[in-house]
Amino acid sequence: MSSVSMSLRHIVPENSSTTAIKAFRRVPCCVDGRKLASRNARRRAPGVRADEKRWGKVKAVTSPDCDGPMTATGRSNVPILSGSEVVERLKAFHENRSGEQNYSAMYSSIFGGITTDSAAMVIPMDDHMVHRGHGVFDTAAIMDGHLYELDQHLDRFLRSASMAKIQLPFDRSTMRSILIQTVSASKCMQGSLRYWLSPGPGDFLLSPSGCPNPAFYAIVIEGSSLPVCSGVKVITSSIPMKSQQFAVMKNVNYLPNALSKMEAEENGAFAAIWLDDEGFVAEGPNMNVAFVTADKELLMPYFNKVLSGCTAKRVLRLAEELVADGRLSGIKLRNITVEEGKTAEEMMLIGSGIVVKPVLQWDDHVIGAGEEGPVAQSLFELIMDDMKCGPPSTL
């Protein structure tokens, strides 16, 4: 008999049930950092009687080294639900939730189809993306019922999956078809399509080796209104940005991004701007940054340390029209100092959700004249027209 079995034998009578042994093994605790009780103290600790098999009879017990009792919630407080009862409660939850976004369709490779029931739009807790953050995602805008630049987003999505060492459940053309069919089933005319790849469900271990099948998910998020070209304030983020390896990969580890956005909101700003390890301007929490100099040159940071924004790249392409008609003198990707950024004529944030958003103030510095600049407004109009009319890649 193993040493573990021997110790349990001395503590719990041989006629005790397995349930009682497991319950007892969970009793010792110490919430204030002091050492666990000695073996003799553990032997004297109260356990759960073998005949107390019903959940309702489980008692709160006190560890010898703890000041107060552990809390144990009985069956009277937490119901045990059937599958159908869970579904009904999920439906009620979604009907009564106060969120601003509506989800009109979801695809899941777990159940192998599309659902328009928001209560069924769930993923397994043991998916490696959920408990280990091992997953990648991307988003494509839906404009007038058409997906905008799906192929560019899908290419980046697959590059991210390769960097994250996630196998593909289907080939590219199959995933593309699934995404189009999901949007079609949603009947959404205005919004966005977000999709994920993960090693899939399997267990709660660190390695994904126990996840036999990679998972592919997609959800359609309805948009209530079109983006507007209104000016905002930004601050410099104090939250460390991701290292280069993870910054250029669109992965689900967005805790730094979320904390950066929260920091901005706490300071009355729209977003917080990250600086790279050399102190140059990097990006916002989920958008790229661009500037217009006094010489009317459009500047954007290199994409080698930040996420390669599909919308930002399209804006750079459309900005060539402004160079052609003289509203811009040139377009350049290079390192940009904070001083250059704060003394620029115009500053703007660029991303699929906001398109082009002028920045009027960065920290305590007013940008340019402190109002929406002509280049930002022109780029906003160009990209919106592009989304409505559609480049050749628009579906």
Image: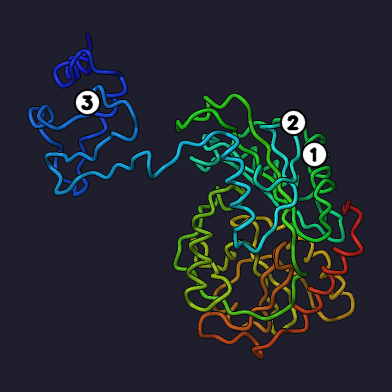
Residue at the limit of the structure toward the bottom, as seen here: 369
| Tag nearer the camera, 2 or 1 | 1
Of callouts 2 and 1, the N-terminal one: 2
Residue 178 is labelled as 1
The residue wearing badge 2 is 170
Provide the residue designation for mark 3.
Answer: 49
Residue 375: quarter of image: bottom right
Q: Could you give the CA–CA distance between mark 2 and mark 1, rounded to whole angstroms?
A: 10 Å
Please give the name of the residue rendered at 77% of the width and 57% of the height, measured from the top-left corner.
141
| Secondary-structure class at tag 3 | loop
- Marks 1 and 3 sit apart, C-alpha to C-alpha, by 54 Å
Q: Residue at x 24, y 37 (%)?
A: 59
N-term mark: 1 or 3: 3
327 relative to 78, above or below = below
Look at label 2 and name its amino acid.
Phe
- The answer to the question of whether label 2 and label 1 lie on touching residues, with beta carbons closer than 8 A, is yes
| Quadrant occupied by the N terminus | top left
Mark 2 or 3: the one toward you: 3
Q: Residues within 10 Å of mark 2 (few under 14, many from 20)?
A: some
The amino acid on which the numbered mark 1 sits, given as a three-letter code, is Ile
Q: Is residue 325 positioned above or below 47 on the image? A: below
Q: Secondary structure at mark 2?
A: loop
Residue 92 left/right relative to 6: right
* Residue in the foreground of this view, choosing between 62 and 212: 62
Q: Position of residue 246 (x, y in %)?
A: 55, 49
